[in-house]
Amino acid sequence: MKIAFCARGLSIPSGGVHQFIKFLIPALVRQRGNDEIYVLYNNEKFTGLASECSEIIIKGNNRIFWDFVQVPKVLRKLKINAAIFPKNIVPFFLNCRSYVVIHDLAYFEKQLNAYPFLDTLYMRTLLSQSVRRAGAIFAVSENTKREIVRYTKCNPEKITVTYEAADEMYRPVNDDYVLKQIKQKYNLPDNFILYVGSLSPRKNVNGLLDAFSGICSKIPHDLVLTGSKSWKDSSVFQTMKNLNLSDRVKLLGFVEHEDMPVLYSLAGVYVYPSLYEGFGLPVLEAMQCGCPVVASDATSIPEVAGDAAVLVNAQDSKALADAIYRVITDIELREKLVDSGFEQVKKFSWDKCADTMLKVIRQS
């Protein structure tokens, strides 16, 4: 069988979809068996993830034209049997079976203000149609599956859950020289609380800042935030100013992926206060690096974290502050979280994700 995978999402510099595509493609190659895998890129700089298979460059900067005109034309030319679209939308007029991966339904949650208006309108208009046209749907969590059914009225039997996983690069870093180099590179404090993710409203960074302000006088830890510029992030800077936290909060901006395991290894605790997630991959990344986790109890996060994190209502800043303080000050709790985190991550695998997807495609 000829199976195509559309990898335009790699052009998004960071974030969940980028990571999903980056780690899934090599797993699909490993699990392909007798199937032929074709990976379609919109830029040659992304090639190499499927070097054992067929990598095809379809140059184009307009995502709508690339998705809806250029890709279907190439699929017809290659006589593809099945095509995987890893970012919510299936183009029209395909001559092959189509399969779509849906990461979250935040576009339908008006109160979250999760994405710009035009992106929201685009996704809300086309996502429901894509669900109907797809031969099968892959949801990255049970919560996402429920949301798909809720918002699109899709038959749940059409949806298969394919969990993500942390890449093998995420592991504890104990080399003192490497730890020192990264501390110097990013000018990191000796003790810090870490947040990894965007600064958009649904990530609830303002709630984290509010919680931190309630305990910062009692702990030596500063707060370190990663993440490049994002939608509606100006309120984060205003909140820092209002709470007089400028001297205790460090914004790193975009961090090189290869440096992330070191940051997780250096952190005293990783906090994930998000109000809505389709999956929540940073939780597993932190656990796999031996960093204790405090996380929101919302949406899919409890599925990912299991019993290996302290879960709280992240909209309650006092509860969030108390949880962070407990993890920082209770050595026994920290050790328990680290040990249970190493066990929790074993439940997730990119090879398992790829194998599940390919079995559904082969059987449909």
Image (tube, rainbow, N blue to C red):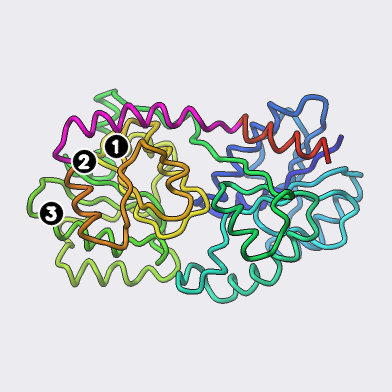
Q: Which of marks 3 and 2 is in front?
A: 2
The secondary structure making up most of the magenta span is helix
Q: Sort mark 3 into few (<14), some (14-19) or many (20+) by Cα contacts within 10 Å.
A: some
Q: Which of marks 2 and 1 is nearer the N terminus?
A: 1
Total of numbered circles in the picture?
3
Res 216 label: 3
Circles 1 and 3 in contact, beta carbons < 8 Å: no
Residue at label 1?
Answer: 292
Give the percent coordinates (x, y) of residue 65.
Answer: 76, 65
Q: In this view, does 326 lie to the left or right of 113?
A: left
Q: Which amino acid does label 2 sit on?
A: Val
> Crowding at label 2, few (<14), some or many (≥20) Cα neighbours within 10 Å?
many
Residue 5 occupies quadrant: top right
Q: Residues within 10 Å of mark 1 (few under 14, many from 20)?
A: many
Foreground residue among 316 and 35: 316
**What SS does tag 3 mark?**
helix
Asked if residue 62 shows in the view, the reply is no
Q: Residue at x 74, y 61 (%)?
A: 130
Q: Which residue lies at the image location 51% right of the left edge and 48% below the top edge?
A: 279
Q: Where is residue 284 in the image (x, y as percent from the top left)?
A: 43, 38
Label 3, label 2: how many angstroms apart (C-alpha)?
Answer: 14 Å
Q: Which of marks 1 and 3 is nearer the N terminus?
A: 3
Instruction: Give the side of residue 60 with respect to residue 10, left or right.
Output: right
Relative placement, left or right, of 151 versus 341 is right
Mark toward the viewer: 1 or 3: 1
Percent position (x, y) of residue 185?
28, 41
Per the image, label 1 sits on a secondary structure element best described as loop
Q: Where is residue 327 in the image (x, y as percent from the top left)?
A: 21, 41
Residue found 63% across the figure and 59% down from its top:
148
The answer to whether the residues at label 2 and label 1 have Cβ atoms under 8 Å apart is: yes
Q: Does the magenta stretch include residue 131?
A: no
- Kindly identify the amino acid type of the residue bearing the numbered disc 3: Cys
